[in-house]
Image (cartoon, grey):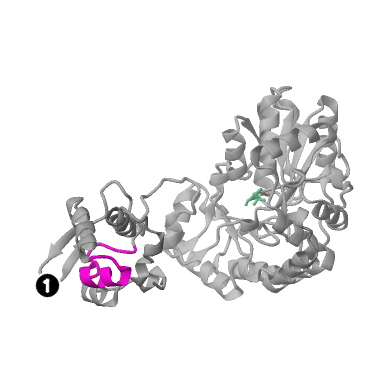
Amino acid sequence: MGSVNPGDAPRTPAAASRRGTDFLQLDPAAAPARGLTTWLADQLRAAIIDGRLRPGAALPATRILADELGVSRGIVVEAYQRLKDEGMVQARRGAGSIVTARPATEPAATEPAPTRVPFLPRRWRADADIDLSPGVPDLSGFPRAAWLRAERTVFNQASAADLGYGDPRGSYQLRHELVGWLARVRGLRAQPEDIIIVAGVAQALALLAQWLRDHGRPLIAVEDPGSRGARDELAYWGLKPVPVSVDEHGLQADELAKAGRDVRSVLLTPAHQFPTGAVLAPERRRSLVSWAAAIDALIIEDDYDAEYRYDRTPVPAMHASAPSHVAYTGSVSKTLAPGLRLGWLIPPAPLHTDLVTAKHASDLGSPALPQLVLAQLIASGDLEHHIRQARRRLRGRRDALLAAVRDHLPGAEVHGIAAGLHVLITFPRLAGQVRDTDLADRIREAGVLVQPLSVHGERSEVPSLVMGYAAHTADQLRTAVSRIGRVLS
Ligand SMILES: Cc1ncc(COP(=O)(O)O)c(C=O)c1O
């Protein structure tokens, strides 16, 4: 009996009884010599449960099925009777036997029982046709051809051992390429042995948070405003985030000392503060490093979108000036795609072994193939080429967004350096009149999704919105901003 894709399942009862049973993939050769009735009933029951036979579908006529299977008709009649006894099948006059329903205890195959997973992309995003949520790169610009080329090269060159359980720090090839890449792009000095490949910045934060918690250091300073996601993650791992204010020069480093001696770690985004877009001023960098050196504190440097600076080369990573106090982390989430879940962590040397042990305990190491492909993309120069192109495209989008803000949102102020994937826009004229959450709700009703700044901490009198522009064309951005203008007028 040929086996046919379940997608070919008959749509009408009549068609089912005429067309036979290929779609059920019944293979009598696999049946036991005795107990054919039980085997057939089991096969049909499985087909009902997994949705190949849906409620309302007709079972094949007993004679046809018996012929196809080469068994006596009595066996088929008896198997059908068992399913009738179980309430799964019903006799219908003129239509043979009809599937009635799946067993009540089994969830429908096509309608999985709803689960509540808090971090699934929010349903209400569907309300808005233009999603300006920050943090989303230009996924339509993913370098598919270059990735495929790199993947082919990897498959031609990779040894069998490359596909096995590897070094929990990550593939040597990738760590080797990253040494050169991070030196060129971020001014960072490291050796392959210093690097741990992780599943994005998120996993780096998880490993560091657990280390801090287990070493009796639950208090951690975070930027205010600062990434809500990062703060929530630290809290999930048992840390207590202590907000420290951010202004146009980045984190107010002198406030760290005031936070108390129990605060001996800080998470920050010095190259491009999220979400204000400020760069940490040089004197603040210096005082942060002095603070860390004085009390042996840990600075976690989240370098989340540093590759995208549009007006000049980005400031070097803090790690370059204080490797013994900085745990540096970055990923390909903004340059390639967050779905790759691929990033790196370079901790201070004394933490290294503990963090590798924790990485090993959590997943035995990150997936090998994407690491090898990324190494090849770096080695071939394709990653650099892709980022150069993306930078040009994103800069054009940022310019288009800013021009639209000037045209449609008079009085609005755009903050931050020319960098990254988002801008912070404040509305001083609306100070005290509307909360940013209400403003974002009204804008969503106009079909545009933006983020209120207060999501990320600070509650200001001046309503402020965070808007991502990377994933949209200049035309879409103009449309979005003109809709916002109409909401505000
Ligand atoms: C500031 C900041 N840090 C870290 C992350 C997480 O990055 P990853 O995808 O590398 O885990 C995000 C995600 O958008 C972010 O906005």
Q: Position of residue 180 (x, y in %)?
A: 88, 56
Query: Nearest the camera: 137 or 261?
Result: 137
Q: Position of residue 412 (x, y in %)?
A: 59, 59
Q: Position of residue 191 (x, y in %)?
A: 88, 46
Q: Is residue 337 visible?
A: yes
| Region of the chain picked out in magenta, as a range | 52-72
Is residue 483 left or right of 70 when viewed as pictured? right
Q: Mark 1: which secondary structure?
A: loop
Q: Is residue 58 magenta?
A: yes
Q: Is residue 223 visible?
A: no
What residue is shown with label 1?
Answer: 94
Q: Given the current orientation, which residue lies at the most extreme front position?
A: 33
Query: Nearest the camera: 235 or 204?
Result: 204
Residue occupying image coordinates x 23% and y 57%: 79
Residue occupying image coordinates x 28% and y 65%: 71
Is residue 285 left or right of 392 when viewed as pictured? right
